[in-house]
Amino acid sequence: MSVPPPAMLPYAEESEPRYVQHVADHFELRPYGKGLLLACGPCPRCAAPLEIPVVLTTVRLMSWRAPVRTDPFEVPMACNCDEDHDPRPDGVTEGCGAFWLLGVPAELA
Amino acid sequence: MTGPRRPLPATRSAGASDLRRLREHRQLVQEAVPRVREAALAWRNGLAALLVALVGFGLIKGRSDIGQLADRWAAAVGLLLLAALGCGALGAMQLLLAAHGRPRALDLPSALPRALLEQREAADAARQLRRGIALTLVCTGLLVAAVGATWYGPAKENGLMRFDTPGAKVCGTVRRVSGGEAVVRTGDGEVVVPLATVLSMAPVSDCPKE
């Protein structure tokens, strides 16, 4: 599937059904140790090349026990591109507003 | 570590609740390092206060001289104190590392994105914090065990005996008993005490000075 060239779209927080297949076809998951991934691929909305850190387990006070996952699971993520997508809301400094769910194989958790 | 993988197709498209969840996750990840560092500082101060209260202010205090203990107990107390010192030093080091981190060279061309680096830092700090707490508590337990041993351990047996005879009182360590005589080592040398002349004898903790 060809990816449309980047276009200066206005910022819009949206998610479309077609993003699901786009992400599955064009993204790559690079594992960097337990519970840490880098999701790389073009944004399904603005087509900017993205490198999105995926943190599956974080530290909350004393607990640092990653749950044992045996099934695939889905994590939400959003475009974090540096392109110019004005007008961005206050406090938002990156992305075009597109967000989607990413299916992570259990062995990468 | 496995190689790059394709993600799986999600079972549905994302909704507003997923966006909220994403923002909450981001906030949790951003707060992870400060949160664990703050917790490490609090634990460091709390555990240091506990140890200072226990040792510095003498809330628990054993014999001042473990030389008064039986040899094996004295050796055990020494080992307990040595182990407590080791655990305390390691625990303090781990707590300091958890609270302040350790400067390390970072190879920028191969460096991970900041969020992943910070997450690793938070995980390391949490691990060090857990180890530091465990080691410090073990140190406290060893100190209490050492003090308990000085409380309840048997005193050193000095083998001193006092013999009362019609002519004199002899006090010292019995070297041998044979042929109806006891040979006693006193401060003035060995003295032979005929047992038939002994009016009374008793173990004593100290011999009176002549």
Image (spheres, coloured by chain):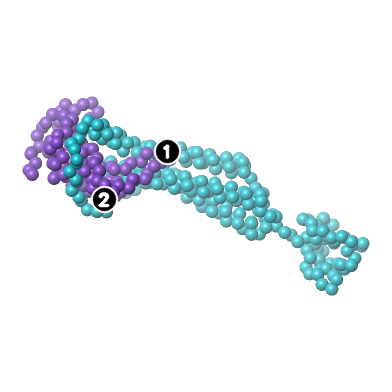
Chain colours: A purple, B cyan
Q: Tell me which residue sits at (68%, 55%) in the image.
A: B154
Residue B187 seen from this side? no
Name, please, the residue furthest toward the right.
Answer: B166
- Indicate the quadrant containing the N terminus of chain A: top left, top right, bottom left or bottom right: top left
- For residue A24, the mark is none
The one nearer the camera, B183 or A68, is A68
Locate residue B183 relative to residue B6 in the image: left or right: right
Query: Which amino acid lies under the numbered mark 2 shown in the image of this protein?
Result: Glu
- Give above or below for A80 relative to B174: above
Q: Position of residue B167 (x, y in %)?
A: 92, 62
Q: Position of residue B3 (x, y in %)?
A: 22, 53
Structural distance between the alpha carbons of marks 2 and 1: 31 Å
Identify the residue under disc 1.
Answer: B39
Residue B210 seen from this side? yes
Callout 1: SS: helix
Identify the residue under disc 2.
Answer: A107
